[in-house]
Structures are given as structure tokens and as C-alpha cells.
Image (cartoon, rainbow, N blue to C red):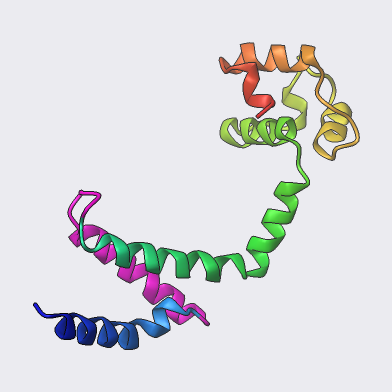
Amino acid sequence: MSQATVLQSVTTFAQEAEAFTHIENDEAYQGALAIVSNLMEVAKDDPNSPLNWAIEGFAKAIASYENQLPEVQEFEAAAANTTVDVAMLRLLMEQHGLKGTDFPEIGDKTLISKILNGSRSLTKDHITKLAVRFDISPALFFY
């Protein structure tokens, strides 16, 4: 294949794919997701697959669009304002279907509420007891 043929193919691709590489609405977003899904099924499981560059390009466009969504921005702002120990406690609560009243090793629901809203912190003793209860490393509360 000649350079001119490749140039023409890439130019045609860029023109056809523009709505999915510069996503401006939900329809294009859904289309880009579908394209990536299909490309991932077709691409060989090989880091040198020629389709990887297309998958990466569409994935970057998808991420760029998602990062502009208000709900993603709100989530990221909330995550940035949440300490690791509180995030870990919330994750444990979600994964195990627990409420503030389900942590006798920490204290009553008022204390749990204060920890979750950031006005109190988990102590070393709390973390040690939670790590034992859930069979996890205490280090997970500090990353």
C-alpha cells in the first residue's frame, strides 16, 4: 500500500469518525461506546494490534466527553473532598449492605455519622478493628 493510499484512507476515516472523536452529545457518545465495544471484539488480544490506536483515540474522546458531564464533575469534586479512610468505610458499607448502626467496633450511629461527614476521623483502633472484621489490610485506609 502506498503512502498516498494510506493518507487517503486515514483522511476518509477522520472525516467519517469526526462525530465520534469530537463528542458533543449523548447520541455521539453512545455511538462512540458502541464503536469501541465492536473494535475490542474484533481487535486481536495483542499490544501491536493495528486497531489499538483507533480504540485509544475513541476512548480518549469518550473520557473527554464524560469529564465534562455535570454528574462526573460533581462526583470528582466529592471524591476529592473525601479522605481515604472515609472512602474505605463507605465502600465497606456499600459492599456489605451496612448502616451506621452496624459498626459496634467504632461506636454508635452518631459517631459513624460524624466520621462519614468529615467532622470526626477514624482512629488507629477503629481501623485495626475494621481490618480484622473485614479481613483486609489496615493500609487500605491510608492510600
Compared to residue 138, the image places residue 55 above or below, namely below
- In front of the other: 103 or 20: 20
Q: Residue at x 77, y 27 (%)?
A: 101
Q: Quadrant of residue 122?
A: top right
Q: Residue furthest left?
A: 1
Q: Is residue 47 magenta?
A: yes
Q: Residue at x 45, y 74 (%)?
A: 29
Q: Quadrant of residue 93?
A: top right
x and y percentages locating residue 72 in the rendered image: 63, 61
In the image, which residues are magenta? 24-48
Q: Residue at x 18, y 61 (%)?
A: 42
Total labels drawn: 0
x and y percentages locating residue 65 in the rendered image: 54, 71
Task: Give the quadrant of the N terminus.
Answer: bottom left
Task: Give the quadrant of the C terminus.
Answer: top right
> Horizontally, is 35 left or right of 96 in the view?
left
x and y percentages locating residue 137 in the rendered image: 59, 17
Q: Is residue 35 magenta?
A: yes
> Horizontally, is 72 left or right of 123 in the view?
left
Q: Residue at x 17, y 54 (%)?
A: 44
Query: What type of secondary structure mainly makes up the magenta span?
Result: helix
> Horizontally, is 30 left or right of 24 in the view?
left
x and y percentages locating residue 32 in the rendered image: 38, 73
Q: Residue furthest front?
A: 3
